[in-house]
Amino acid sequence: MSPSGFEARAAQQSPARRARKASMADVARLAGVSAQTVSRVSNGHSSVVESTREQVLEAMRQLGYRPNSAARALKYGEFRTIGVILFSLSSVGNSRTLEAIVDSAAQEGYAITLIPVAVPTQDGVLGAFTRLGELAVDAVIVIMEVHLLDAATVSLPVGVPVVVVDSNGGDRYTVVDTDQADGARRAVGHLLDLGHRTAWHVAGPEDSYAAEGRAVAWRAALEEAGVPVPPMARGDWTSGSGYRAGLALADEPDCTAVFAANDQMALGLLRAFHERGRVVPRDISVVGFDDLPDATSFIPPLTTVHQDFAEVGRRCVERVLRQVQHRRTEPGTTLVPTRLVVRGSTAPPRA
Amino acid sequence: MSPSGFEARAAQQSPARRARKASMADVARLAGVSAQTVSRVSNGHSSVVESTREQVLEAMRQLGYRPNSAARALKYGEFRTIGVILFSLSSVGNSRTLEAIVDSAAQEGYAITLIPVAVPTQDGVLGAFTRLGELAVDAVIVIMEVHLLDAATVSLPVGVPVVVVDSNGGDRYTVVDTDQADGARRAVGHLLDLGHRTAWHVAGPEDSYAAEGRAVAWRAALEEAGVPVPPMARGDWTSGSGYRAGLALADEPDCTAVFAANDQMALGLLRAFHERGRVVPRDISVVGFDDLPDATSFIPPLTTVHQDFAEVGRRCVERVLRQVQHRRTEPGTTLVPTRLVVRGSTAPPRA
DNA sequence: CGAAGGGATGTTTGCGCAAACAACCATGGT
DNA sequence: ACCATGGTTGTTTGCGCAAACATCCCTTCG
């Protein structure tokens, strides 16, 4: 009930139409100084006598003055804002990457502006990018497939640093990503080390670079080990698709070890195997990818490849801000390593 | 491989130091017209002869011109941007709400700027809000506890519309939220309807308004039905905390039905009961809250209260933009109803 | 006791854009 | 032939801020 804060102040104003926001000039007038002095106080510059500073601060308080960032940005030519263009937040990986990016950016004093791409068609992406060009953004981080950006005709913003996550294209863009191949190799290696004859794979959707990277590395790891390569199942990242793949896999008597391209599909596998009476890990081992916080609570707790989303986010921000400072692009790929987290869903095959 | 788009253009520029971004004046000079004409073309205003328009467009293309949004914002006094202040994205509910907000805002032509609050202390929140005041934002949506905003001394931004999610405070702020009580009542009602003597509850953390709302409604529903109110367990939203609560609950012989305050904790319950040999739903029924996409793949598929995050997001944007347009605040609470989704984790008690 | 020095404050200017106004041109009616 | 009309284009101005420069006044020292 205390009249502090926003609501009470707003009520002091005309209910129908608020006055324009107070500007430096207004503060200056009230404090009986020049606008420049207000600016100096506002920016903590030196050379303002204590008594004057107090007057100005009081005037600011009274008028609820906030510096206008548009004017500031216009003056300085930068917004201290990074645009993030993404297709969806519903994938857990995306939202965790985003969170890491937001946190890292905040530490550097940068805000994040989100630009959703409703439809993952070329049109959709280009639309967003065009809007981004008009937006108050110093740089862009793209969390989606770069090939969707490769439209031929549109003029993408010139001179805006770009960093891409979860995609390929390191020859043309700056890319930061989890080392998909590294992770897949660890998963397969773990299963083979346990003594399984081979490892099956439930891949993510074809249009995902991450999914392809994991699938390719899975196959390579098997071939390298000289073991047979079983047919590959396809999911769409969702647990439902993992469940459907699992129902099919449960009928394969040879299948004793499965590497799912993400934890959600692994969850679906666990349910399918459970329903079919295939006990995990006794009858069949499952490895996921991501290491979701909830993976410890799956039945059984999931052995999985841990992605360091925080590190990916940090690197993204670091690389994009470096480009902002140096005012130039620097293509190249930064890979963040993974690590295998062994829990209860893997075991040696039954004799 | 096509040299279109950003990378190719960037390569045309000096690698070490890019020229300043082209302004309207530059375009005007190249096209041999006045800056005002460029502005008219840029904004699709009438009264520009086709040949002139073509020249200007060509010049824009050549220079890679993008309107400077800082200048535009300064002129118009608005940013077409909504700030979202949040504590964490890791909660699934938050990230889904955010996604809905982003999508709705995009449809209205508004961008979203994210302001993370690293530490959920008062200082942290106020810090973020202060920064928001300086940011290029026309309005603010807060996804966190409003009581953290109730600090007495700091001057929150004046005249910036605010909408709060996942919190109380409808008397002072505009609040949009899922109808927690409604959801909890449905959950409890379902369990009692099935014939359970009572329903136990694993609540969320004390400092969460949503958690308290669900807990209070749970208790009220039991009392209303005239059934005994068992002791309440506390979790922290994570599946791990649900697991720990579940281990304790599994030892309660009377406990045949549990309502978990969210799906993640329900997941933990399922695992705990599974480990203790309490078969769900034969021996014990579990109801969650949220209806995560993965809830269908739990073992067994989870009966849960569905939250319409998309609707919450839509309403947030709608209400906050209405305030922007009318230039006034309008306290009051908008509640979004829930619905019960019955799956495989609930059943009548054993005789 | 006057000049030099330096801290505190004020004034001018321009960032990029677009509204408001001004100027100019071609056309058509009288 | 002349002016009114209206469509096209140019010029001026100010949004809010802060760097650069200008001014003022007080201290200090020869």
Image (cartoon, coloured by chain):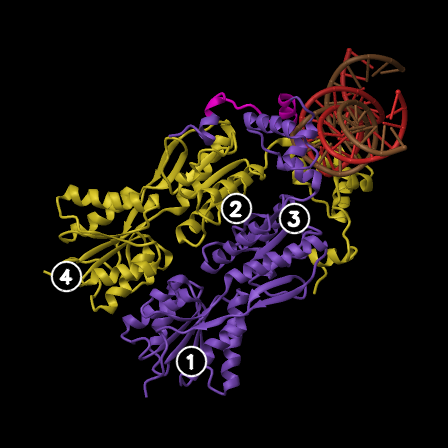
Chain colours: A yellow, B purple, C brown, D red
The chain identifier of the residue carrying mark 1 reads: B
The chain identifier of the residue carrying mark 3 reads: B
The numbered mark at residue A253 is: 4
Span highlighted in magenta in the image = B11-31
Q: Is residue B64 above or below residue A255?
A: above
Circle 1 SS class = helix
**Which of the two residues, B252 or A114, is positioned nearer the viewer here?**
A114
Q: Are marks 3 and 1 in contact (CB under 8 Å)?
A: no
Task: Give how far apart the Cα atoms at labels 2 and 3 are.
Answer: 15 Å
Q: Amino acid at mark 2?
A: Leu
Q: Are marks 1 and 2 in contact (CB under 8 Å)?
A: no
Q: What residue would you read off at disc 3?
A: B138
Disc 1 vs disc 2: which is toward the camera?
A: 2
Disc 4 vs disc 2: which is toward the camera?
A: 4
Horizontal side of residue B158 vs A193, given as left or right: right
User: On the same chain: label 4 and label 3?
Assistant: no
Disc 4 vs disc 1: which is toward the camera?
A: 4
Residue sitting at 52 percent across and 45 percent down?
A115
Q: What residue would you read off at disc 2?
A: A114
Q: Is residue A166 above or below residue B9?
A: below
Task: Give how far apart the Cα atoms at labels 3 and 1 are.
Answer: 45 Å
Task: Give how far apart the Cα atoms at labels 4 and 2 are.
Answer: 48 Å
Disc 4 vs disc 3: which is toward the camera?
A: 4
Q: What residue would you read off at disc 1?
A: B191
Task: Give how far apart the Cα atoms at labels 4 and 3 are.
Answer: 61 Å
Task: Give how far apart the Cα atoms at labels 4 and 1 are.
Answer: 40 Å
